[in-house]
Image: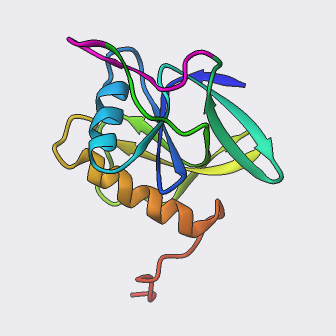
Amino acid sequence: MQVHASCVAFEGKGVLLRGPPGAGKSDLALRAIEAGARLVADDLVAFDLRGDRVWARALPRADGRLEVRGVGIVRLPALDSAELVLLADLAGPERLPEPDFEPVLGRPVRRIRLAPFEISAAVKLRLAVQMASEDKGAPRVSDSDDGR
């Protein structure tokens, strides 16, 4: 399976950046890389199952290439693959979203909406990847939910 998207990874945990052409996928990927992420794939991302986990990777001959509008195609150090823990739809975010999951190759992957051009978008992405890594792909109850 492959999709039109970009993928970066924080500490080996991948996030798929989805949106229509011009939505900011590659731009946010570039800013995430500047904030400590590693490129996995840009433009087309392929998925594989390894055990019960979904992994993202670049297509052959596309690894390490990132489209930087106004500059061109640049080559960056890239990971061969990363465990996919988060889907980020590039759109206006919800203020306090409930955990949301979407199946990818039959496995639940956490999903968020994120405004890609906000200055804090790369930091929000890193935080969301950390949260998604902790829940191991299963819905969980918030620690702050004390019934009040």
| Residue 91 appears in the picture as rendered | no
Q: In this view, does 53 lie above or below 117?
A: below
Work out which residue is located at the far right of the displayed protein and give it: 51
Q: In which quarter of the image is residue 46?
A: top right
Across and down, in percent, residue 143 comes to: 46, 82
Stretch in magenta: 61-72
Across and down, in percent, residue 32 comes to: 32, 43
Quadrant that contains the N terminus:
top right
Left or right, 85 with reference to 21: right
Q: Please say which color scheme the image uses.
A: rainbow
| Residue 144 appears in the picture as rendered | yes
> What residue is rendered at 50% in x and 25% in y?
5
> What residue is rendered at 27% in x and 38% in y?
31
Q: Which of 10 and 141 is in front in this view?
A: 10
Magenta span contains residue 69: yes
Q: Is residue 115 above or below residue 123?
A: above
Left or right, 137 with reference to 23: right
Q: How many marks?
A: 0
Quadrant that contains the C terminus:
bottom left
Across and down, in percent, residue 110 comes to: 56, 52
> What residue is rendered at 37% in x and 55% in y?
126
Magenta span contains residue 44: no
> What residue is rendered at 60% in x and 15% in y?
61
Across and down, in percent, residue 27 comes to: 29, 28
Q: Is residue 19 above or below residue 109?
A: above
Q: Is residue 148 above or below residue 40?
A: below
Q: Which of 93 and 10 is in front in this view?
A: 10
Q: Which of 54 and 12 is in front in this view?
A: 12
